[in-house]
Amino acid sequence: MAIALFAPLFALGLFSGMLLLLETGRRLGLRRAAADAEGARAGLGAVEGAVFGLMGLLVAFSFSGAAARFDIRRRLIVEEANAIGTAYLRLDLLPAGAQPKLRDQFRRYVDSRLEIYRKLPDVSSASEALVRSNAIQGEIWTAAVEALREAPQAAVLVLPPLNAMIDITTSRTVALQTHPPALIFAMLGVVSLACSLLAGHGMAGARSRSWVHIVVFAAILTLTVYVILDLEYPRAGLIRIDAVDKVLRDVREGMR
């Protein structure tokens, strides 16, 4: 559950910090203006432009990377469903006596694969389900190789899809665990806070606070960072990839 709570807690902390630094920046700006009314804003445009530009680049690259990884994870689900479906159909090429056992193993295997992702974001339970799934993989491979001793001519058609079915599980596991370094998320937070301080300083020229600008600025930046985090963990947040699992469930339904 720690993963599921990370994004909202990070966003809440970031929003609160941004509001605080917007106010802090405004007060610092008022103090500077009182001390040096003529030069209060001298030379600040270049600094603000550099920091806000950096923020824009960080958000753009982080969002682009998170969306790309989301699409890869979604595509791998479809590829796994296709690989399992193909391997299951190729069982028709094996001796009739070996098919019932293998078909039952395939059904248990797909159930175990669905169970892994159904248990997320509970990593511990998902890991246990992955171990069981890998054990069934071994059983399927052993049973298929044994059956091919009676029909060796079918090996060239049966083994490649079985191998692809097994290989795709590694690809999905790695894709699930692939995220930017934690330092990137920390930098997003730090630069967002820095932008808030500078934005608050820039608002010091007004006689009163513009709460609309303050809240909207903090809310939009926080929401953007939250969406990036949510895309990175599509099994834990509001942006879910679970709907794509339907293609794997459809394959399972076709095995009855």
Image (cartoon, rainbow, N blue to C red):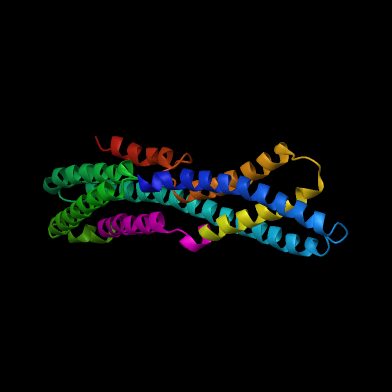
Asked if residue 183 is positioned above or below residue 209 in the image, the reply reads: below
Q: Is residue 59 left or right of residue 132?
A: right
Is 183 included in the stretch rendered in magenta? yes
Q: Residue at x 27, y 42 (%)?
A: 115
Rendered image quadrant of residue 54: bottom right
Question: Quick check: can you spot residue 235?
Answer: no
Rendered image quadrant of residue 209: top right
What is the span of residues highlighted in magenta in the rendered image? 158-185
Q: Is residue 35 left or right of residue 94?
A: right
Q: Residue at x 81, y 48 (%)?
A: 205
Asked if residue 38 is positioned above or below residue 229 in the image, the reply reads: below
Front position in the image: 147 or 152: 147
Return the residue found at the far right: 38
Q: Residue at x 71, y 54 (%)?
A: 28
Quadrant (top left/top right/bottom left/bottom right) for the N terminus: top left
Q: Residue at x 13, y 58 (%)?
A: 146
Front position in the image: 113 or 156: 113
Give percent across and percent down for residue 238. Answer: 47, 39
Asked if residue 92 is positioned above or below residue 38 in the image, the reply reads: above
Give percent across and percent down for residue 195. Answer: 67, 55
Asked if residue 166 is positioned above or below residue 208 in the image, the reply reads: below
Is 1 included in the stretch rendered in magenta? no
Front position in the image: 157 or 29: 29
Is the stretch drawn in magenta largely helix, strand or loop?
A: helix
Return the residue found at the far front: 35
Question: Quick check: can you spot residue 252?
Answer: yes
Give percent across and percent down for residue 48. Answer: 74, 60
